[in-house]
Amino acid sequence: MNYLKTGILLIALTLLFVWVGGLLGGREGMQIAFGMALIMNFVSYWFSDKIVLSMYGAKEVKEGAYPDLHRIVRSLTQEIGLPMPKVYVIQQDAPNAFATGRGPSHAAVCATTGIMETLSEDELKGVIAHELGHIKNRDILIMTVTATVAGAIMMLANMARWAMIFGGGRSRDDRGGSSNAAGLLVAMIIAPLAATLIQLAISRSREYEADKRGAQFTHSPMGLANALRKLDEASKFKKMKVSPQTAHMFIVNPLSGDFFATLFSTHPPIKERIRRLESMVVA
């Protein structure tokens, strides 16, 4: 059922993008937006991992440089039955981690140096298991495509804003200046909000599933629960510069502390995630 809901939300996000294109350029704008959506999904499928990793200066590391991290990833993938993903590290004090790629055979796990310094081995194992849960569930492609389309909607909203400032040229299908202005206003305000809400709904459901998978993989729900508690606390003091469109890929929200970013956070509340993990502990 979760996959069905996710699929419906992805379709809704793509249709929203095409609709905004129509508001800006009429029928021709819709056709252009639809073509852009196809291109973006193609690029996301084949190059999403390279794009995201390069955004944050992540470097692929060999076992000799980070033996403990490699050992944890290898032992978990062998137990789960996943191919060994590439291992990346970001030289960053803020503790966080994410997974990316287009599928289990083309995946990467990335951790900051800060998370390896902050967590115990059991806690780090829980975090890596969570990211492998995303890979196992094939969430990483879904979440990257979501980020790409949502980012494009934000771009169209900015175009609408500039169109409003410079007079809001009429589309071929809309002869009324006032109705065209109303369409631009909708594109500028409503569309980004709708895109954010859809992105939020997709990401939150996938985070809960990855938490559950991670706890099952390690047979230790408290390892991940304790890690989330530490990461939540550390994120308040050690900030990481990230794009809002990719923030949902990290295990904890790197934008926490910003009121508006937290209000529309793509991550479920940490307390609720911890509560669910603790409920999995067998008394």
Image (cartoon, rainbow, N blue to C red):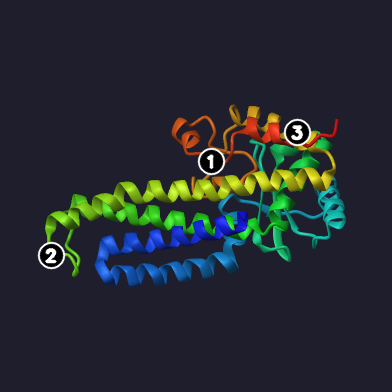
Q: Is residue 257 above or below residue 210?
A: above
Q: Amino acid at mark 1?
A: Lys
Q: Position of residue 39 (x, y in %)?
A: 47, 70
Q: CA distance from mark 3 to mark 2?
A: 60 Å
In the figure, residue 5 lies in which quadrant? Answer: bottom right
> Which label lies toward us, 1 or 3?
3
> Which label lies toward us, 3 or 2?
3
Provide the secondary structure element on which disc 1 rests.
loop
Q: Sequence-wise, which precedes: disc 2 or disc 1?
A: 2
Residue 217 in sight in this render: yes
Q: Position of residue 234 (x, y in %)?
A: 65, 29
Q: Nearer the viewer, residue 221 or 223?
A: 221
**Residue at x-position 59% and y-position 34%:** 269
Provide the secondary structure element on which disc 2 rests.
loop
> Which label lies toward us, 2 or 1?
2
Disc 3: CA contacts within 10 A as few (<14), some (14-19) or many (>=20): few
Q: Sequence-wise, which precedes: disc 3 or disc 2?
A: 2
Q: Is residue 62 left or right of residue 163?
A: right
Q: Nearer the viewer, residue 157 or 94?
A: 157
**Which residue bears the numbered disc 1?**
241
Q: Position of residue 11 (x, y in %)?
A: 48, 62
**Which residue bears the numbered disc 2?**
175
Residue 128 in sight in this render: no
Q: Nearer the viewer, residue 61 or 96?
A: 96
